[in-house]
Image (cartoon, rainbow, N blue to C red):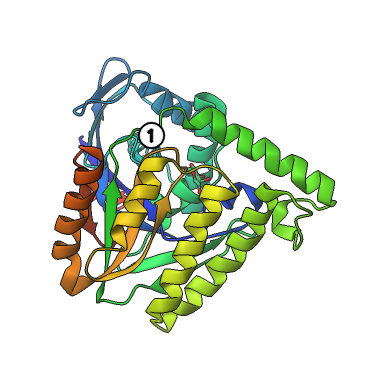
Amino acid sequence: MTLRYRAPGRVNLIGEHTDYNDGYVLPAAIAFDTVATVSPAEKLELVSLNDPPAGWERYVLGVIEQLQKRGVVIPPVRLVFDSSVPIGAGLSSSAALEVSAALALLGAAKRELGKLEIAQLCQQAEVETVGLACGIMDQFIAMHGKANHAVLLDCRTLVSRQVRIPKDIALVIADTRLKHELASSEYNTRKAECEAAALELGVTSLRDANVWNGNRRARHIVTENARVLSFVESLETNERRMMGELMAASHASLRDDYEVSCPELDLMVECAQRCPGLIGARMTGGGFGGSTINLVAAEHSEAFRDRLARLYEAETGKAPNILITKAADGASASTDDPRIQ
Ligand code: GLA
């Protein structure tokens, strides 16, 4: 029997690099996803219908290892992946791959696991097999996304809450097309720097800090956690000026204190200020390339996209890839597999 499962990419509205510091994040799943089709085979076969970077299979092999550790017996299968999530754009194509693979393999093995456990095993696959010491945000939202909502996640307790995104606000993602290839060593360095800062401040993790003693990495985490909670309030009351200010402060903090932005992301955020309908703009995801997230008054989203593309191209000579999207549901079976709700 052939089974098919989909898992979405994500965009993070605010709360960047806070997840591995036990902090708050506010991602949304997006209407771009990876579809995994699984069918019986003689031996394991992995096929991508896209043009993925070398070594993409490691993500799937990592998931297989994690499933096996949990006692899942995986029969020989052919797994075919077809993805609309731009790769290397900071939109979590890797989590979409891992989660779609996990669901497909569980389907083939006729096993069920809870949503949180699936998210966690996919995160562990990335940490242990791929070597990126990532937090839980991407895999969590790929499983728990909700149409028209962002999800506030407390990465310490793993308690989450859906926050409605006002209907008249569009999510506009501006991909610089600068692939964030060098990001993983810097990412792991930031994580180590945060652990050292927590030790120095005498706290378990930076989530518990409220001072930073001149440490800029710590200042980013402490102020970013506060911004997430204020942003949720402003989203719930549709206070657009506040949303914009918080997103601008988040970007500045990532650029100046956490040092994970790059000239292209900074320029994309600056150009957005000159486009119609902008509510707020900031880099999204790990940084060092990839995309910005723009909240835009929906009636202006196309004019915004066209003007942003023109302004950015005029400055850089490179055409960005700008996507107008909305918050989507988390992973699911795309056949009528009764095992997946
Ligand atoms: C990557 C990681 C996430 C998170 C973000 C930064 O996407 O996979 O866990 O740390 O970067 O917020």
> Who is closer to the viewer here, 331 or 38?
331
Furthest residue toward front: 315
Is the CB atom of the residue marked by disc 1 within 8 angstroms of ligand 1's nearest atom? no
Could you tell me residue 159's position as x and y percent? 57, 64
Report helix, strand or loop for mark 1.
helix
Residue shown at the point (31%, 15%) measured from the top left: 43
Could you tell me residue 186's position as x and y percent? 55, 32
Callout 1: few (<14), some (14-19), or many (20+) C-alpha neighbours within 10 Å?
some
**Quadrant of the image containing the C terminus:** bottom left
**Left-right relation of 188 to 167:** right
> Who is closer to the viewer here, 157 or 27?
27
Could you tell me residue 273's position as x and y percent? 32, 63
Residue shown at the point (44%, 38%) measured from the top left: 288
Could you tell me residue 83's position as x and y percent? 23, 38
**Left-right relation of 13 to 336:** right
**Left-right relation of 221 to 67:** right
Furthest residue toward top: 42
**Would you place residue 243 above or below residue 158 in this image?**
below
Furthest residue toward bottom: 237
Q: Can residue 134 be seen in this view?
A: yes
Q: Name the residue under label 1.
A: 109
Question: How many numbered circles are shown?
Answer: 1
Residue shown at the point (43%, 54%) measured from the top left: 141
Q: Look at label 1 and name its amino acid.
A: Ala
Answer with the quarter of the image where residue 102 lies. Answer: top left
**Quadrant of the image containing the N terminus:** top left
**Would you place residue 98 above or below residue 299 in this image?**
above
> Who is closer to the viewer here, 151 or 39?
151
Q: Is residue 331 visible?
A: no
**Left-right relation of 86 to 190:** left
Residue shown at the point (34%, 73%) measured from the top left: 165
